[in-house]
């Protein structure tokens, strides 16, 4: 009986130590330091020029406007948002939407276009991964086609978590995990461009040209904010 009692005590002691160790490890790996706190403050409205490469802001056309429920969610997710429509001399229009969140922990993940468009009654017609070529490196992007009645909207977007542009989904989770190992909470940026039209291929070419001209017009530190410091800077 005494030997059995000793075995039970030893087992309980080992289990207790294991639980204590797990608790300590969890506490040690729980991110507490926000990367955003160490970054220089910035304003999206001032960072993105209203005129560049033949493009100017068209105040008469607004990008997709979120409903009240979406507005509340966006306010909770992001510290800054920017929504503009640009037009060039050829009459081409590109809608630009940028959202910045200083806390990309598991509880405050970037709100992706696949979610917000569908929530507002759009059907997702196409969804594929790709790369957007720029002078500053290849950017992993998602290309979507969303449709609501007669409105056909091809979309290109990318996400940065901390210092790196990543593919949405697993790429975001992995990047948050890497930051979490060092006790840091990364910030995040979502950059979306879209056009309205039936020809997807033409739309993506216009969007790529727009993005490249916008990047060329930015100061190097602002390009890094949009693309991530890990992207090659020319």
Image (cartoon, rainbow, N blue to C red):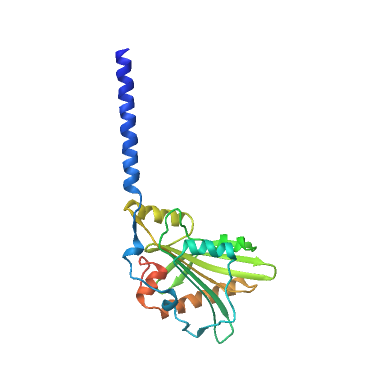
Q: Is residue 47 above or below residue 183?
A: below
Residue visible at 59% across and 64% down in the picture:
117
Q: Is residue 152 above or below residue 4?
A: below
Q: Residue furthest bottom?
A: 89
The quadrant in which the C terminus is found is: bottom left
Residue closer to the observer: 189 or 135? 189
Count every numbered label the image shows and give the total. Answer: 0
The quadrant in which the N terminus is found is: top left
User: Residue 110: image x %, image y %?
Assistant: 48, 60
Residue visible at 35% across and 75% down in the picture:
220
Q: Is residue 129 visible?
A: no
Residue closer to the observer: 28 or 207? 28
Instruction: Say which quarter of the image contains residue 202.
Output: bottom right
Q: Residue furthest right?
A: 149
User: Residue 61: image x %, image y %?
Assistant: 59, 79
Q: Is residue 199 visible?
A: yes
Residue visible at 62% across and 74% down in the picture:
196
Q: Residue furthest top?
A: 1
Residue closer to the observer: 122 or 80? 80
User: Residue 156: image x %, image y %?
Assistant: 53, 68
């Amino acid at each position: 009986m005494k030997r059995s009692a000793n075995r039970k005590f030893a087992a309980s002691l080992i289990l207790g130590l294991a639980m204590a160790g797990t608790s300590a490890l969890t506490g040690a790996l729980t991110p507490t330091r926000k990367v955003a706190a160490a970054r220089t403050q910035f304003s999206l409205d001032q960072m993105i020029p209203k005129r560049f490469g033949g493009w100017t802001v068209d105040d008469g056309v607004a990008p997709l406007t979120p409903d009240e429920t979406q507005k509340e969610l966006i306010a909770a997710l992001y510290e800054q948002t920017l929504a503009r429509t640009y037009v060039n001399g050829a009459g081409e229009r590109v809608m630009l939407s940028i959202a910045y969140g200083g806390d990309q922990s598991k509880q405050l993940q970037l709100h992706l276009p696949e979610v917000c468009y569908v929530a507002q009654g759009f059907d997702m017609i196409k969804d594929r991964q790709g790369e957007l070529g720029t002078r500053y490196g290849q950017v992993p992007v998602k290309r979507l086609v969303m449709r609501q009645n007669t409105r056909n909207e091809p979309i290109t977007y990318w996400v940065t978590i901390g210092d790196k542009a990543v593919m949405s989904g697993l790429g975001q989770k992995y990047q948050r995990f890497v930051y979490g190992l060092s006790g840091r909470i990364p910030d995040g940026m979502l950059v979306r461009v879209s056009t309205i039209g039936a020809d997807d291929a033409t739309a993506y070419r216009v969007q790529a040209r727009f993005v490249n001209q916008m990047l060329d017009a930015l100061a190097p530190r602002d390009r890094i904010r949009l693309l991530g410091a890990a992207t090659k800077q020319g």
